[in-house]
Image: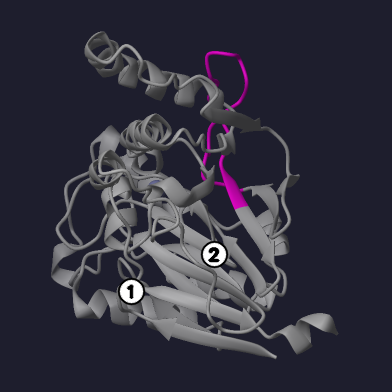
Amino acid sequence: MMRFRRTTSYSSHRVSNASFCALIALAGWSCLGTGRRVQAGTLPGHTTKIVLLGTKGGPGIVRDRSEPANLLIVDGQLYLIDAGAGVTRQVARSGYSIYSISTIFITHHHLDHTAGLEPLLGSIELDKAYIKAFTGKSAPPLPIYGPTATTFLVKAALNYISVSERIFRADVPALPSDAGMFIPHDISNDGLVYKDSRITVTAAENTHFGRASYGPDGLRDMSFAYRFDTPAGSVVFTGDTGPSEPVTRLAQRADVLVSEVYQPILQPQSDKKRAPLSPVVAELMQHMKTEHLTPDEVGKMAARAHVRTVILTHISSDDRPQSFAAIKAGIRRWFHGTLIIGKDFTSFELTKNATAQAK
Ligand SMILES: [Zn+2]
């Protein structure tokens, strides 16, 4: 039996930070196993939980919505999807530990989805170095999957971190090395991209990049949607995209579609007579129109894919009630399943009990 649960509260998990662990370790104790690792759900069988860490669409820092990032927690194992600015803090605020992230997936390399990667890797590196220094225990390497240029991006992040590390290492020469701590993987094709004992991840290139661009290695830049098949159900993240047949196929019969949405600003009739747009504004508007999803387009995709639930994140809209009403109305014209407009830290659970799993 599949059970669906929606919560908007903070997780009750408590985790320690590295400096606290260091103090604990100095006192002769280990903090590993005392809250740093998230425990599997208490419900019988399997649990897959989605935590929206950042629900803002596009770059720019605002008060109430952080930059794009999501946690997927499968039977206690943490997977991070996208790493927008502030992601490190958002993971901590959600009650989980960055140390417990087992794999990172990046949908595409626009800054709103990657600006938080360097601070995150820097903090994880420090965390792991301290823990190794005080306990002698090495953490497994952290894989980072993303489109072409992910290896370049991770190397660039580690270069950034290396300036501080070089100076700090002069004072602490015995600090454990970061060599092999992060393992980037470039994805350049649709299909199966990752598999472990809990999940299978399938990618489909979406339509977010309207014009071809190429990275330093000559490979075409790509933008992906990801499907996570887990023991408790399937979750599809659209990433940023316009209407897309491959993404609609990827989402077929998914339990949850975590979708972006773009709500054009609602203008009074009297405001519609305007001077011609400058070229840059015209290009930006064209990008928003064709490379993002309007509410109607989200609704059509969800209906055609026969998904059970749509959760909206990466919400490109102003925060006026009439804009949210328009988002709901547009999606509801086509899709009649569960519809949730996400906020930062909204979380959702799919559970499957052991009996059902055995069938
Ligand atoms: Zn974006």
Quadrant including the N terminus: bottom right
Pointer 2 residue = 76
Using residue 267 as the reference point, say whether residue 292 is left or right of it: right
Query: In this picture, is 296 found above or below 272?
Result: below
Residue 131, position as x, y percentages in the image: 39, 37
Quadrant including the C terminus: bottom right
Instruction: Please say whether residue 220 is one of the residues in the magenta stretch.
Output: yes
Residue 11, position as x, y percentages in the image: 35, 72
Pointer 1 residue = 12
Using residue 349 as the reference point, say whether residue 164 is left or right of it: left
Front residue of 191 and 272: 191
Residue 300 seen by the camera: yes
| Amino acid bearing label 1 | Ser
Type of secondary structure dominating the magenta stretch: loop
Element type where label 2 sits in the image: loop
Bounds of the magenta span?
Answer: 206-225
| Amino acid bearing label 2 | Gly
User: Residue, x 35% and y 59% (percent of image)?
Assistant: 53
Element type where label 1 sits in the image: loop
| Sooner in the amino-acid sequence: mark 1 or mark 2 | 1
Task: Report how far apart the C-alphas of labels 1 and 2 lie in the structure.
Answer: 14 Å
Query: In this picture, is 81 found above or below 129?
Result: below
